[in-house]
Amino acid sequence: MTMRVDWLTGCATALVTPFTAKGAVDEARMRALLDRQIAGGVRLLVPCGTTGEGATLTDDEQQRVIALTVEVARGRARVIAGVGSNSTAVTVERARAAKAAGSDAVLVVAPYYNKPTQTGLVAHFTAVAEAVPGLPVVLYNVPGRTASNVAATTTLQLAREVPNIAGTKEASGDFAQIMAILRDRPEGFRVLSGDDAVTLPLIALGADGIISVVSNEVPDMMARLTDLALAGDFASARAIQYRLLPLMEANFIESNPGPVKAAMALMGLLEEQFRLPLVPVQEKTRARLAEVLKELGLLSRAAHVAA
């Protein structure tokens, strides 16, 4: 039977990781950004995922970012720690460390580069889940990043056979596949959108929420959109969706998290620093982001985060 995780719903933020000019994790800004998320109504925080540049964090940095997120969130939000890698053994160790740090769940991306078979994916996710009994595990299917797709039949098999695999973040863009999961999932298994722009239609089809990039910039608006959609007020949710759509699209003009960090820098929320091989966005991308932010009134009310 699937572990029932009633709180795994609504708007979760795939958090950026702020860096200093010297390349270190900027813990002061991270704390301020976490407080801003919670103040904006976000109750699910996802550190060390794709948007958080988890692939280029050292083990110590990853553990520190997760521990810091747990510390700030305690009693106010839940933490779903990104722990995925292309090595099952490494993912297991990261999942155990996240559990020890107090994470409420872990997000496990399909192994990238290796291109495992569906049988290999089942073995990978099962091994990770069995290493952290009692801790909810959320699958993460993002073929555009991993070069392999977690098929609906694979997701459903894992949902039925591994009790603490409690949900999936679906970023395949394949509506037929996602609908197959929604239609046939066991009771209690959560399905979260992995793409801001399709949050509303997926919730209309039965999905439970979103792990969002755009909520880094507008936590209040994205949390409100998701809550309205889950409550069935699609007219009000649709108005916010169309208002935010240009920003959702601008966030992916270049590879994530390039644009979202550039936008947050324009808003005064962080320094635009990345870990190689990621680099700052092109000026035409920055200009488009500035235009969209201005239209949304986000530049005039930009809040500077204390360093």
Image: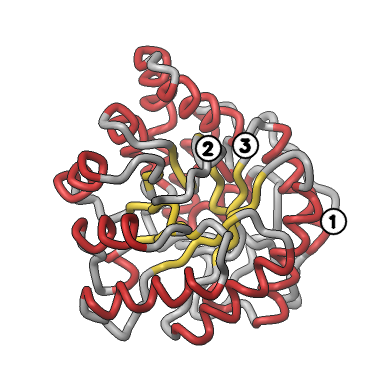
User: Is residue 82 at all visible to an observer of this figure?
Assistant: yes
Seen at 56% across and 46% down, the residue is 13
* Nearest the eye: 292 or 107: 107
Left or right of 102 in this view: 227: left
Q: Secondary structure at mark 2?
A: loop
- Residue at which label 3 appears: 42
Q: Which three-letter amino acid code belongs to the residue tagged 1?
A: Ala
First in sequence, mark 2 or 1: give its number. 2
Residue 131 picture location, percent across and down: 54, 75
- Residue at which label 2 appears: 6
Q: CA distance from mark 2 to mark 1?
A: 36 Å
Q: Which three-letter amino acid code belongs to the residue tagged 2?
A: Asp
* Nearest the eye: 91 or 274: 91
* Nearest the eye: 117 or 64: 117
Residue 281 picture location, percent across and down: 48, 62
Residue sitting farthest toward the front: 1
First in sequence, mark 3 or 1: give its number. 3
Within 10 Å of disc 2 (Cα), the crowding (few <14, some 14-19, many 20+) is few
Image quadrant where residue 97 sits: bottom right
- Residue at which label 1 appears: 307
Q: CA distance from mark 3 to mark 1?
A: 22 Å
